[in-house]
Amino acid sequence: MIQRLRSTAFLFSAAFTGAVATAQIVIVPSGPANPATPQPIVTYSSDVLHYGAPSGMLLNPRSRVQVFGFPRPGVTIELQVVGARPNVAATFVVSNGWADQQVPGYGHVLVDTTGATTLTATTDANGRATVPLTLPASTPVGDDWFVQCNTINASGWPTWELSSAAAFEVGSSTKAIGMTSNLAGTISVHGLGATVTSPNVSGLLSREWNPRNGGVSGLVAVHTVTDTVQVNGITVQDLHVHPGVNELGIGWTSGTFMSVPAATPDQFFVGFSVGGVEFGPYAVPGTLGVSLGDVAVHLGPIPALDNNPLAGASLQLDLDETYVGTEYFQHFDSLGLPLTYAAGFAVTGSQVEANFAAFAAVLQNALAAHVGNQACFAMAVPDYAQFLAREAAVLMEITGGLASTNIEVHMLMSTQMMSGDEGMLALLFSKLCALLDIAEDLKGLKEVFDAECGDLAKQMKKQLDAGKNKDAAKTAGKILDKIASKKFAKKLTDKLGGKIAKKILKKIAAGCVPLLGWALLLGGLIWTLIEQLLE
């Protein structure tokens, strides 16, 4: 480990011994272009997942890296740092491996620097720099790559700033893609006398984008839960905010990637309870702003319906993104999945049961160590017996009583009462509901799930059939991102109504226990699928 630390420190410092070149921005067209009319439109990589921490050597540094383009073997993509200091040297470190190293003088280095590639640039007046990266033609599809950026001032006493990091997966998909991150902060209630502020807010931020057809647009969803807030002597509990039914599209460019201008009009659903009585959800107009990890939501007024005690109030949410740490990748890599089709035949129910117990213990430890309010994160991994009972109930509901087990689903497929794709969707849906403890309007929910996640489920089945279980887990992660998205929330609300949709969305958001919950859900899904599909 000492040698690794030394080599890392050398790598991060060696680039600053000579002149630093300014990289030219590479624009990747996403749709048919008219050669006579250049279209400065960029596309964005799949599965961008921010994690890590800045060095702490500057006051509240907020620099982070972003990835542009659809990374495929032999293709040139862009790496960009934003939020850094202006006019300073920037070194991007890129590797197809990750590490977890505290380097004295630099901070928390999250990219494995052994054999890493370094690319240099100079930040502009806005603290932004971009470099092109051409992936080797021999890069395997499905390979994970990691990038982090270090900046240093050009004069005076050298001061470094280490950005957050990003991960991306090499593939070929050009479908809509997205990411999730956690939120923590405060909520203020205005308009009912004195302003009341509570720090007991936690939640989930979902961003998705679709760069096809010559345009770059995205959707942003904010899910939050506030444990308790005292308003005019009344204890308001479970104050939750979820996306409304409007499908507001955000236009993103290379300069505004994954950000939303302050005070952008939006709509949200707000609900709460007082003395055990539930109020809402109410459709409330508001504004949204997202920039460099800061999320601002302003809502109001709350409609004067049902004699609710917050009628006429406006709400202000001041939130910060919480980037996932390396434990996400540690737990993803340690799911213990059998890596071949043949190895899957050896999986037993007792092994799956043991893994469920291990996941539950990890999740409890993660919640215990989590800094900040946990109101949103009520998710708990069931034991295997509970999981099977929940799964049976879901299957009975969605098959009209024809199946309650994996074997019975396979019998329906073998008698052509259910196609292979329908069977896979049923099994995947039932497992997800069982893990998240969702039992509300299952048939209606499944219609939305099939429409939004059907293609991903088919992809997952192919990966499982080929024994590519880790790839299947990544695809399951994309499904989780999808069900946390604004588009899914809108379709769910349109189909089931606000009250039922609110209950389901709360359980989905609760599964993102500072994103560790996502990794553990993936483990439960894939372990049970392997055990049941190959028994």
Image (cartoon, rainbow, N blue to C red):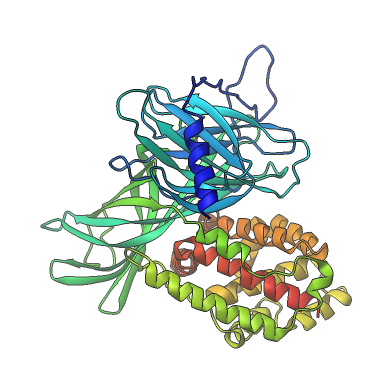
In the rendered image, the vertical position of residue 367 relative to residue 82, given as above or below: below
Compared across the picture, whether 470 is left or right of 157 comes to right
In the rendered image, the vertical position of residue 396 relative to residue 115, given as above or below: below
Q: Which residue is more in the foreground, 197 or 169?
A: 169
Compared across the picture, whether 453 is left or right of 229 comes to right
As drawn, the residue found furthest toward the left would be: 194
Horizontal and vertical percent for residue 318? 29, 50
Q: Is residue 140 visible?
A: yes
Compared across the picture, whether 160 is left or right of 474 comes to left
Q: How many marks?
A: 0
Horizontal and vertical percent for residue 276? 29, 79
In the rendered image, the vertical position of residue 386 relative to residue 338, given as above or below: below
As drawn, the residue found furthest toward the top would be: 36
As drawn, the residue found furthest toward the right would be: 415
Horizontal and vertical percent for residue 187? 26, 57
Residue occupying the point 56% across, 42% down? 209
Q: Quadrant of residue 347?
A: bottom right
Residue occupying the point 46% across, 30% down? 90
Horizontal and vertical percent for residue 361? 50, 78
Residue occupying the point 33% across, 23% down? 155
Q: Quadrant of residue 198?
A: bottom left
Compared across the picture, whether 25 is left or right of 339 comes to left
Q: Quadrant of the C terminus?
A: bottom right
Q: Is residue 179 visible?
A: no
